[in-house]
Image (cartoon, rainbow, N blue to C red):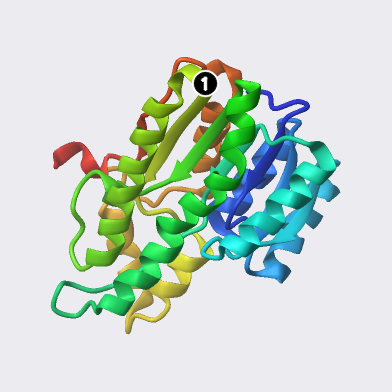
Amino acid sequence: MFSLKDRITLVTGAGSGIGAAIAETFAKAGGFVFVTDRDEKGGRETVARIAAQDGQAEFLPLDVSSEADCARVAESVHGRFNRLDVLVNNAGIGHVGTMLTTTGADLDRLYAVNVRGIFNVTKVFIAGMVQRKAGAIVNMASIGAVVGVRDRLAYVTTKFAIAGLTKAMALDHALDGVRVNCICPGRVETPFVTGWIKKYPDPEKAYREACATQAVNRMGRPEEIAAAALYLASDEAGFVTGTEFIIDGGFSAGK
């Protein structure tokens, strides 16, 4: 298993789903994890699961779209450890709609979290990483950052932006000892996705169809995405920066 022993890490959107899985995986790998989320209940539940397995974690409430919130969290992290070694920008939201049905407010709402949120959180931590000549940043994009997805205009727009942001940061800081990568998952079976499926008239049919979009005929599991995040955060990925790590069950293979 890749090690994060003695590493100070922070995961946004870690109250459930992929973010929670990443936080728990990082703790098992020896890292101290700052679990952040707008959802205090979910965030504290993640911390409790980590503590139950003798891991180290602390919850910090965070709305990534708020610069003031990000500054407050950075002050807490630096006040406790004076550094952050690994940052996972996982927090994100979605929207269903085409150009015809998506409003400017819809796009702005997604941009504020999915793109500006990554900018805001990274902004308060990257200077310290550059100063220490060490750091790993993992941004959560989507297969929608690599190929188009129908009826997801605003979502795809922001995810393509995340891929571009990742590459730009990776090039800017390659000689500063800071690696920046993004993960592009296909459909993953998270509470958000299962909740969305339950809203369909025939949830069982919707579930089968969601699985069928992947070549392997199933959705991904949060822990499978977390394993990739652990690799990218570890020293073993020292030669990996600026990449789009696709984990999509073969969804994009025929595109």
Provide residue 153's location: percent of width, then percent of height: 22, 65
Task: Report whether 18 appears left or right of 97.
Answer: right
Pick whichever, 245 or 121, lies toward us: 121
User: In the rendered view, would you say 149 is above or below 162?
Assistant: below
Provide residue 135's location: percent of width, then percent of height: 59, 28
Q: Secondary structure at mark 1?
A: helix
Residue drawn at point x = 39 percent, y = 52 percent? 219
| The quadrant where residue 83 appears | top right
Quadrant of the rendering where the N terminus is positioned: top right
Residue drawn at point x = 75 percent, y = 25 percent? 5
| The quadrant where residue 55 appears | top right
Task: Report whether 124 appears left or right of 145.
Answer: right
Residue drawn at point x = 26 percent, y = 76 percent? 104
Q: Circle 1 sits on which residue?
A: 176
Q: How many marks?
A: 1
Task: Report whether 47 appears left or right of 150.
Answer: right
Pick whichever, 225 or 203, lies toward us: 225
Pick whichever, 181 or 147, lies toward us: 181
User: In the rendered view, would you say 57 is above or below 196?
Assistant: above
Provide residue 246's location: percent of width, then percent of height: 34, 37
User: In the rendered view, would you say 186 is above or below 69?
Assistant: above
Is residue 196 visible to us here? Answer: yes
Provide residue 225's location: percent of width, then percent of height: 49, 42
Residue drawn at point x = 46 percent, y = 60 percent? 92
User: In the rendered view, would you say 197 is above or below 20?
Assistant: below
Disc 1 crowd, CA 10 A, few/some/many (<14, 14-19, 20+): some
Quadrant of the rendering where the C terminus is positioned: top left
Is residue 249 visible to us here? Answer: no
